[in-house]
């Protein structure tokens, strides 16, 4: 099977390629939500973005990888918000498209995720990005 990533990187030369979550299963699940048009946002620890010197910008393209590191979609960042974990709204949580899309579900799952990452606090700053699906592969 040919790897389409080099062609995509030519089409979207500044795009970064990455997967959602912290496991192959989560990468597959969240990528499927993006492709279905349900997941239109994501968030990460602002501190982690800063440490990696990898802050996204509005207008950036990203090549989304599945759990096997195969490209499945291209998204474009449309908005960025810096917000504390404790201040995430039900509207923002719903845009992540996970579970029942409630704030309670979002808080439970993201607390577990950031705890695994070792960065969780109620006051932690998140970089919340909204995006649109540009292409499915």
Image (cartoon, helix red, strand yellow):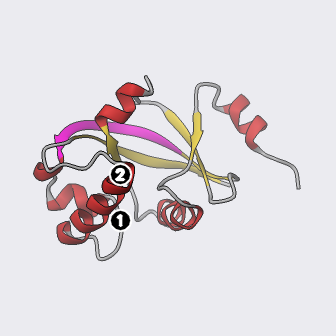
Where is residue 11 drawn, in percent x and y?
A: 69, 32
Q: Quadrant of residue 38?
A: bottom left
Picture layout, residue 23 above or below residue 57? below
- Answer with left or right where residue 107 lies relative to residue 41: left
Q: Using the numbered discs, state the Cα–Cα distance from disc 2 to disc 1 in whole angstroms.
A: 8 Å
Asked if disc 2 and disc 1 are in contact, CB closer than 8 Å, the reply is yes
Q: Nearer the viewer, residue 62 or 136?
A: 62
Residue furthest toward the right? 1
Picture layout, residue 35 above or below residue 62? below
**Residue at (43, 22) in percent of width and height:** 53
- Please provide the residue range marked out in magenta: 75-84
Q: Quadrant of residue 27?
A: bottom right
- Answer with left or right where residue 118 lies relative to residue 72: left
Mark seen at residue 24:
none
Q: Quadrant of residue 39?
A: bottom left
For mark 1, give the secondary structure. Answer: loop
Is residue 113 something that shows in the picture?
yes
Where is residue 20 drawn, in percent x and y?
A: 49, 53
Q: Is residue 51 magenta?
A: no
Mark seen at residue 41:
2
Q: Nearer the viewer, residue 123 or 105?
A: 123
**Residue at (22, 63) in percent of width and height:** 107
Binning the other alpha carbons within 10 Å of mark 1 as few (below 14), some (14 to 19) or many (20 upward) gives: many
Question: Which residue is under mark 1?
Answer: 97
Residue furthest toward the bottom? 100
- Answer with left or right where residue 60 lies relative to residue 3: left
Is residue 57 something that shows in the picture?
no
For mark 2, give the secondary structure. Answer: strand
Where is residue 29 drawn, in percent x and y?
A: 51, 68
């Amino acid at each position: 099977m040919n790897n389409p990533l080099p062609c995509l990187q030519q089409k979207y030369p500044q795009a970064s390629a990455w997967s959602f979550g912290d496991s192959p299963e989560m990468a597959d699940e969240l990528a499927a939500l993006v492709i279905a048009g349900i997941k239109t946002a994501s968030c990460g620890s602002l501190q982690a973005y800063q440490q990696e010197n990898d802050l996204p910008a509005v207008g950036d393209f990203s090549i989304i990888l599945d759990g096997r590191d195969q490209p499945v979609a291209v998204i474009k960042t449309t908005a960025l918000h810096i917000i504390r974990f404790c201040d995430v709204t039900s509207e923002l949580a719903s845009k992540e498209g996970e579970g029942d899309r409630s704030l309670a579900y979002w808080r439970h799952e993201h607390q577990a995720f950031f705890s695994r990452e070792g960065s969780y606090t109620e006051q932690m700053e998140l970089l919340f990005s909204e995006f649109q699906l540009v292409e499915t592969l």
